[in-house]
Image: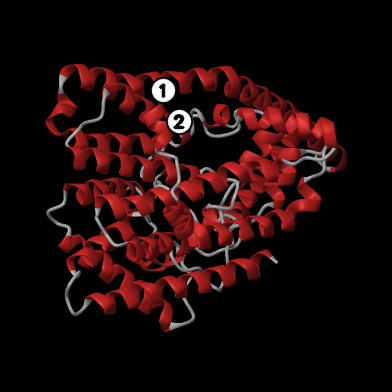
C-alpha cells in the first residue's frame, strides 16, 4: 500500500510541467460553476429536473449532480455498476453542508475529484513519456499538454460526468503496465482484481481494457490457471452479479412503480377523453361510439409517432442492429467516413464553431463541418503524426498495448455504432493514445535534422489547440 501511495507523490518537476494545464482547468471549472451557480445552489427543488433540463454542455449528463444532491442509483447500473456507490461519500458531505449552510454546494464538491483526476492524468502521462518512452523533459511536457488541448479532454475535465475519472484510471493503468513491462514483472492477482473493479465499476468497458493491458503485461502467464480463474473470470462474474442485484434492489421497484402510475394515468386520461367524445358525438349506438373513438385514438397515436420521429433525439439516432437489451444501443446506418472526419478526429480534438457544444439529442446535427480549411489541416497533421508514431513504435509492445485498448473503443463505437452519433463525447477514453504514439516519432527523430522542426510543429499545434478550444469553450459558457 505504501508503494502504491508513493506513486501519487508529485515531484517539483511535475508540478512545474502541469502548472499551465492545472491553471486552465481550474479557470474553466470556475466559469462552469459560475454559469449555473444561482440555479444549482438552491435547495428544496426538483433536483433531477433542474440539473437535467438546465445543464447543457454537448451531450454530457449532470447525473452526478443529482446523485450527490440526493443519493440514488441513477446511473445505468449495467454500464456504471459501482459509480453511484463511489460518489456516496460526496453525497453524505453535501447533505451535511446543505443542512449547515442552506446552500447546495454540489458543484464545488464534484469539481474536486474531477480536478484531482485531471491533474494526475497529466502527471502519469508526463511520467509515461519520461520513464517509459525516455523522452526529454520539454517534449514530455509538450505532449502531456497536447492531450489537454484536445477539445473533449478539456471539456470532460470540467463537466459532472464520469469521463475524466475514466481517463485518469486508464492512463494510470497504462503507466503501471508500462513500468511493469520495463521492469520485467507482471500483474499479481490482487492488483488485476483491484484495477478491474475500480475501472469497470466506473464504466464497464474500461474493465475490458484493464484485461487488455494485463494480457500485454503478463504475456503467457495471463492464461495460467490460477491467475485466469481468479483475476480474469471471477471479477466479471462478481461485478455482473452485483449489477443484477443493484438493478433488482434499487432500479426495478422504482421502474415498476413508475410504470404502474403511468398506466393508471393513461387509463384515467383515456376514460376522460372517451367521456368527452361520447358527450359530443352524434352517434347513438354504443358499439359505434367505441369504434369511432378507437379509430380517433389510433389516428392520434400515429400523428404522435410521426412527430416524435422528427425530433432530434429520434432523428439523429441511426437504426440499431437489433432489438435486444444491449444490441438496441448499436447503430448500423450512421456514416462512418463522415463521422471519422468530423467527429472522431474532428470534434473530439477541435470544437466546431457552428452548433457549438450543442446536444445531438436536442439540436445539433450528427455531422457538422468546419468553416475553415485550417481545421482540416490541423486534423490531417495530427493523423500523420499518429501514423508516423505507429510506424516508429511498431516494435514496442507497450505501444501496441495502448493501441489495442483504443482499438476496442473503435470496435465499440465505429464498428457496432454504440454512441456513434456523439462519438466525440467518449474521446477521453482513447485520445491519450495519440500523444503516446506521437512520442515514438519524437524519440525516433532524436539527433536528426528533423528533430527541431518536429518539436516546433508540436508546440505550434498544442498552442493552436489550446487557444482555439479554450476561446470557443469560454465563449459558449459566458
Is residue 380 in view from this perspective? no
Residue at 52% across, 53% down: 156
Image location of residue 275, percent across then percent down: 83, 34
Q: Camera-side residue: 371 or 402? A: 402
Residue at 67% across, 34% down: 68
Looking at the image, the residue that sits furthest to the front is 12
Question: Which quadrant holds the N terminus?
Answer: top left
Task: Check residue 416 in the rendering and tell me which mark sits there, or answer none.
Answer: none
Residue 440, quarter of the rendered image: bottom left
Residue at 49% across, 63% down: 151
Mark 1: few/some/many CA within 10 Å (<14, 14-19, 20+): some
Image location of residue 471, percent across then percent down: 58, 72
Q: Which residue was labeled with disc 1?
A: 239
Q: Which residue was labeled with disc 2?
A: 201
Q: Secondary structure at mark 1?
A: helix
Q: Camera-side residue: 200 or 467? A: 467
Position of residue 217 in the picture relative to residue 24 (left or right): left
Q: CA distance from mark 1 to mark 2?
A: 8 Å
Image location of residue 149, percent across then percent down: 46, 64
- State whether residue 350 is above or below residue 34: below
The first of marks 1 and 2 along the sequence is: 2
Position of residue 183 in the picture relative to residue 168 (left or right): left
Mark 2: few/some/many CA within 10 Å (<14, 14-19, 20+): many
Image location of residue 228, percent across then percent down: 22, 22
Amino acid at each position: 500500500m505504501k508503494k502504491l501511495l508513493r506513486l501519487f507523490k508529485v515531484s517539483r518537476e511535475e508540478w512545474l510541467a502541469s502548472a499551465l494545464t492545472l491553471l486552465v482547468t481550474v479557470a474553466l471549472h470556475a466559469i462552469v460553476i459560475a454559469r449555473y451557480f444561482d440555479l444549482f445552489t438552491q435547495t428544496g427543488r426538483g433536483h433531477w429536473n433542474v440539473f437535467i433540463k438546465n445543464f447543457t454542455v454537448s451531450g454530457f449528463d449532470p447525473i452526478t449532480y443529482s446523485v450527490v444532491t440526493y443519493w440514488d442509483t441513477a446511473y445505468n447500473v449495467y454500464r456504471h455498476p459501482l459509480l453511484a456507490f463511489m460518489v456516496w461519500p460526496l453525497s453524505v458531505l453535501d447533505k451535511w453542508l446543505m443542512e449547515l449552510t442552506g446552500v447546495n454546494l454540489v458543484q464545488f464538491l464534484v469539481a474536486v475529484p474531477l480536478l484531482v483526476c485531471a491533474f494526475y492524468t497529466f502527471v502519469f502521462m508526463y511520467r509515461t513519456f519520461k520513464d517509459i518512452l525516455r523522452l526529454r523533459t520539454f517534449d514530455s511536457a509538450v505532449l502531456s499538454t497536447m492531450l489537454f488541448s484536445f477539445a473533449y479532454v478539456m471539456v470532460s475535465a470540467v463537466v459532472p460526468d464520469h469521463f475524466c475519472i475514466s481517463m485518469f484510471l486508464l492512463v494510470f493503468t497504462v503507466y503501471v503496465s508500462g513500468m511493469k513491462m520495463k521492469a520485467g514483472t507482471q500483474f499479481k492477482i490482487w492488483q488485476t482484481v483491484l484495477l478491474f473493479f475500480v475501472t469497470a465499476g466506473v464504466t464497464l468497458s474500461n474493465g475490458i481494457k484493464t484485461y487488455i493491458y494485463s494480457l500485454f503485461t503478463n504475456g503467457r502467464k495471463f492464461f495460467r490457471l490460477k491467475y485466469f480463474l481468479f483475476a480474469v473470470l471471477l471479477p466479471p462474474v462478481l461485478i455482473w452479479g452485483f449489477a443484477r442485484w443493484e438493478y433488482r434492489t434499487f432500479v426495478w421497484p422504482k421502474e415498476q412503480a413508475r410504470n404502474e402510475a403511468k398506466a393508471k394515468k393513461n387509463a384515467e386520461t383515456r376514460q376522460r377523453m372517451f367521456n368527452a367524445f361520447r358527450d359530443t358525438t352524434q352517434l347513438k349506438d354504443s358499439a359505434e361510439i367505441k369504434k369511432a373513438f378507437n379509430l380517433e385514438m389510433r389516428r392520434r397515436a400515429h400523428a404522435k409517432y410521426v412527430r416524435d420521429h422528427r425530433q432530434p433525439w429520434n432523428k439523429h439516432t441511426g437504426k440499431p442492429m437489433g432489438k435486444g437489451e444491449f444490441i438496441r444501443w448499436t447503430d448500423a446506418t450512421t456514416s462512418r467516413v463522415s463521422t471519422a472526419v468530423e467527429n472522431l478526429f474532428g470534434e473530439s480534438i477541435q470544437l466546431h464553431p457552428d452548433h457549438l457544444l450543442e446536444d445531438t439529442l436536442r439540436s445539433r446535427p450528427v455531422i457538422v463541418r468546419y468553416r475553415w480549411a485550417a481545421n482540416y489541416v490541423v486534423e490531417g497533421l495530427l493523423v500523420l503524426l499518429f501514423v508516423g508514431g505507429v510506424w516508429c513504435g511498431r516494435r514496442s509492445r507497450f505501444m501496441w498495448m495502448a493501441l489495442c485498448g483504443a482499438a476496442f473503443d473503435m470496435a465499440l463505437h465505429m464498428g457496432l455504432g454504440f454512441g456513434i452519433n456523439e462519438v466525440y463525447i467518449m474521446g477521453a477514453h482513447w485520445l491519450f493514445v495519440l500523444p503516446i504514439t506521437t512520442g515514438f516519432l519524437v524519440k525516433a527523430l532524436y539527433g536528426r535534422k528533423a528533430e527541431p522542426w518536429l518539436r516546433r510543429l508540436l508546440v505550434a499545434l498544442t498552442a493552436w489547440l489550446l487557444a482555439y478550444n479554450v476561446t470557443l469553450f469560454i465563449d459558449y459558457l459566458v
